[in-house]
Image (cartoon, rainbow, N blue to C red):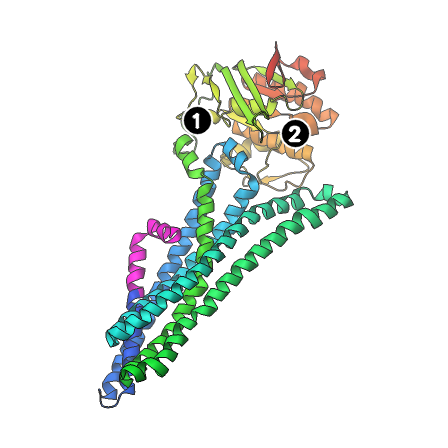
Amino acid sequence: MKLVHLLIKTSWVKVIFATLCGLTSGITNVGLITIINLMLREGQLQKSNLFWYFVLLCCLQVISSTVTQVLIARLAQGVTFNLQQHFVFCIITCPLKQIENIGIPCLLTALTEDIQSISAASLALSDLSISVAILTTCLFYLSWLSSTLFCLMFIFMLIGIFYQQILIIKGIYFLKRTREYQDKLFYHFRTATEGIKELKLHCVRQEEFLNYDLHITTKNLSNYRERASNFFSVAAGSGLLLFFIPIGLLFFFIAPLFDIPSTVVSGYVITIFFMMSPFRVLLVSLPVLSQANIALAKVESLGLLLAVNQTKKILKLSPDNQLCDIPQKNWKSIQLEEVTHTYRGEGEDSKFMLGPLNLNFYSGELVFIAGGNGSGKSTLVKLITGLYIPENGIIRFNEQDINDENREWYSQQFSVVFSDFYLFERFLGLDNFIINNKAQEYLSQLQLEHKVTIKDGVLSTTALSQGQRKRLALLTAYLEERPIYIFDEWASDQDPIFKKIFYTQLLPDLKSKGKTVIVISHDDQYFSCADRIIKLDYGKVIFSE
């Protein structure tokens, strides 16, 4: 079972100790059954002796079961915590192209639904481990009471378990189908939140989304979940027959026919009734465990860990928490030689190729990249910064080839404000001394001093217009002090006055500080500000001057 393997991998010492405590709990339960059985017999042992044995076993049972539950609960919380941390690490360090191929809804489902299922199943293992221990030791006790009777009962149990397994397999199948529709449901949730304005302004679109997309997905999800629950419920209900039928057969047929002693019959009856509660726990836990295994399989199928092992290069930090060996000065050039990147559609002929590209970028240069929509400008930025790995060709930085060993280091040379940028509420990874000394000056320069304040590296608000939010993203880029700056259509959301300030003041100011600035822009009236212009059309460089 994947979940058990995950627990063992996390802490095999705790698993072994919890297992031993669970076995102790099971043995003490059998001991209690034995004492109760002896007390029902006349003239076996003095009740005073049995009383103290009874008290001792009760105390031991409470301690062992409590320790088992505490250990498994702590281990389960540790597994959930580690899994969340590791999964987020995998997302962050995974190649961007693979993240885009997987899709945000799938990742959100894994981070929420799947990990929650794994957490619930991990917590259920504490009760399950004790129940399995009790059932196992009870079976041993029944075999000790009468091996012949136990063989007959065991054959009947195998038939019942086989029947239940058929029901459980069907339930697991429908759980897997449920998991498939959870990804679709999260996609619709994202549509409802990110597309709320468009939905509100178009009643027909709103109605079709609610009554078709969302309704069909939630209906299928509910149907599959209900069918899975039905199979597991039938399996749990029919499981009680594994106990009542043997009791009936024992009382009315087997005992009279084979003249089995009443002490053995009473021992069997008491033990079987005692086994019903842990067996019910076992049956109730099966759907939870099955869902957790499906969730783990889904997480593994994303293939994030493999991608990390292939491309991730861990960077060392200096004592002041800064990345070591990043050349802030004295770099000379970036070279793209025969670099290509292909977007593939659903059909074999449906693809778009950027390149082959042969471009150079030099230190202290201001370069504009122009081109129509879909010409490959944003893809070029991702290639330049190392976010995309070239399918063919090579990228060189200061005559050094960029590969899997140094790509992460190479990406640290850039500060980028993407067209679909994300604005953090605090300045992550920046020294408070730098923030306190320079942030206020930049806020004034960006005309945001009356809108935003900064305290302890935290922005007072990010609830601003898109243009003002882009200015805050630009502020973050300023504070990073990287040697190369890239702005992807940054000025598109600015008013005419500040757009002019951006092209005629901010960009030349960065260049005067020795920074290389690459700007994706449609504002041809400001192209004269650039040292060089590169124009793309359908993935090809048609102009570079």
Task: Tell me the residue that label 2 is attached to.
Answer: 446
Name the residue nearer the viewer: 313 or 327. 313
Name the residue nearer the viewer: 520 or 290. 290
Q: Amino acid at mark 2?
A: Leu
Q: Is residue 64 visible?
A: no
Magenta stretch in the rendered image? 1-22
Residue 381 image-quadrant placement: top right
Residue 29: x %, y % from top left: 31, 73
Q: Is residue 211 visible?
A: yes
Our reading of the magenta stretch's main secondary structure is: helix
At 38% from the left and 65% from the top, the residue drawn is 159
Tell me if mark 1 has few (under 14), some (14-19) or many (20+) residues whose alpha carbon lies within 10 angstroms of its own: some
Does residue 534 appear to the left or right of 272 in the view shown?
Answer: right
Measured Cα–Cα span from mark 2 to mark 1: 30 Å
Does residue 384 appear to the left or right of 272 in the view shown?
Answer: right
Task: Tell me the residue that label 1 is attached to.
Answer: 409
At 43% from the left and 34% from the top, the residue drawn is 307
- Secondary element at image label 1: helix
Q: Amino acid at mark 1?
A: Trp
Name the residue nearer the viewer: 282 or 504. 282
Does residue 252 appear to the left or right of 236 in the view shown?
Answer: left
Quarter holding the C terminus is top right
- Total labels: the figure holds 2
At 73% from the left and 28% from the top, the residue drawn is 495
Query: Marks 2 and 1: which is nearer the front?
Result: 1
Residue lying at the far bottom of the rendered structure = 43
202 to 448, vertically: above or below? below
Sooner in the amino-acid sequence: mark 2 or mark 1:
1
